[in-house]
Amino acid sequence: MRALVMTTIGESLEVGEVRDPELHDDGIIIETKANGICRSDWHLWQGEWSWLGMSIEVPWVFGHEFAGVVVEVGKDSKRFAVGDRVFVPHVHGCGHCEDCRSGFPNVCMSLLAGISYWGGFGQFVSVPAADRNVVSLPDTVSFEVAAGLGCRFMTAWHGIVDQAQVKPGEWVVVSGSGGLGLSAIQVAAKAGASVIATDINDQALALAKQAGASHVVNSKQDDPVLAVQELTGGGAHVSVDALGLRATCQAAIASLRKRGRHLQAGLTSQEEEGYVALPVDTIALQELQIIGCANMPISRAPDMVRMVENGVIDPGAMITKTVDLEGARDTMHDMGSFNAPGITVINNWN
């Protein structure tokens, strides 16, 4: 099969032929029809997240936001048949641990698509434990739209709806208007919140306005904390760090009003290595809440998919480009300089 392959960590990615995946007894093989290019792929390409226990061997095929058609079914898989349209959440549950048994396989992370096994930068993907880790895709939802559901949009939806429990009329500030940030902006706006988006890229901020942001702040030109405090008359009810940088996390928390809720959605980079200094006294005295979100319990996927199918939310509105494998390689390079606004989707492996 054709794929975009990492042969050396941090160096140029190559387009070429690689071995076809092998079918697991409890799994399925999917012909990839669309795959979103996520900043997480860039982090892993750069050799980051070793502090999370993630180490990638070479050669490797990334891609964890993929949708497609089932072309083979393992003998122990019962839910899917050849020809079914599906998408795959990034985080898989083992089905046996306490987290899985209590309904939160999203924090089990026994397998990670594109990290534990080769992903959607290839023409075909072999997904293990398919019956509990794959989601059916309605005919009315395109593969391109579904490509972002398995990671960025799913994480944002779970974070805004389930974790932070954003309410109509609240102020929400989203730090970082990349793919995850744009997803959070759209979901929060659809929940009835007034959303402020911050970023250093004017193109990203223009997309944030399209996604539903009421106000945008260029953090290079204006102090985002002061701007949010002035716009909201005292601070946001909810802040979202969608990048994981020290600057975005600290600014997001500083933008909250008393008893505000901070949602940490972005993961850190090499500079932070998992740790960011926080204003502990302020958190205590103002009764701020720090909330995390990791992907989404797969049991919530049908609710999200119905909202997409009914047009309540529209992940496709944030897709700015579709590319082939050579274009995907260029997009990965551009992510290093934050020069790839919006969401780019691979939909051509020829």
Image (cartoon, grey):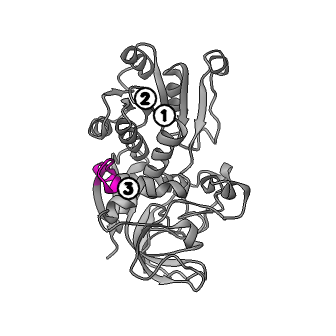
Where residue 17 sits, quadrant-wise, is: bottom left
Residue at image position (50%, 25%) is 251
Cα distance, mark 2 to mark 3?
A: 24 Å
- Secondary structure under the numbered disc 3 in the rendered image: helix
Of marks 2 and 3, the one in the foreground: 3
**Which x, y percent locates residue 229?**
43, 16
Residue 128 in picture, x, y percent from top left: 58, 73
- What type is the residue that disc 3 sits on? Arg
**Are there few (<14), some (14-19), or many (20+) residues within 10 Å of tag 2?**
many
* Rendering quarter of residue 327: bottom left
First in sequence: mark 1 or mark 2? Answer: 2
Task: Tell which of 281 and 312 is nearer to you.
Answer: 312
Residue 184 placement: quadrant: top left
Say what amino acid the circle numbered 2 marks.
Answer: Val
**Badge nearest the viewer, 1 or 2:** 2
Lower sequence index among marks 3 and 1: 1
Q: Is residue 41 magenta?
A: no
Residue topped by disc 1? 240
- Name the element at disc 2: strand
Is the Cβ of the residue at disc 3 closer than 8 Å to that at disc 1? no
Q: Which mark is residue 306?
A: 3
Q: Amino acid at mark 1?
A: Val
Element under label 1?
strand
For label 2, the residue is 172
Tell me which segment is drawn in magenta: 308-320
Name the mark on residue 146: none
**How far apart are labels 1 and 2 at the CA level?**
8 Å
Let me know if residue 311 is in the magenta part.
yes
Residue 276: percent from left, percent from top: 62, 32
Q: Are marks 1 and 2 in contact (CB under 8 Å)?
A: yes
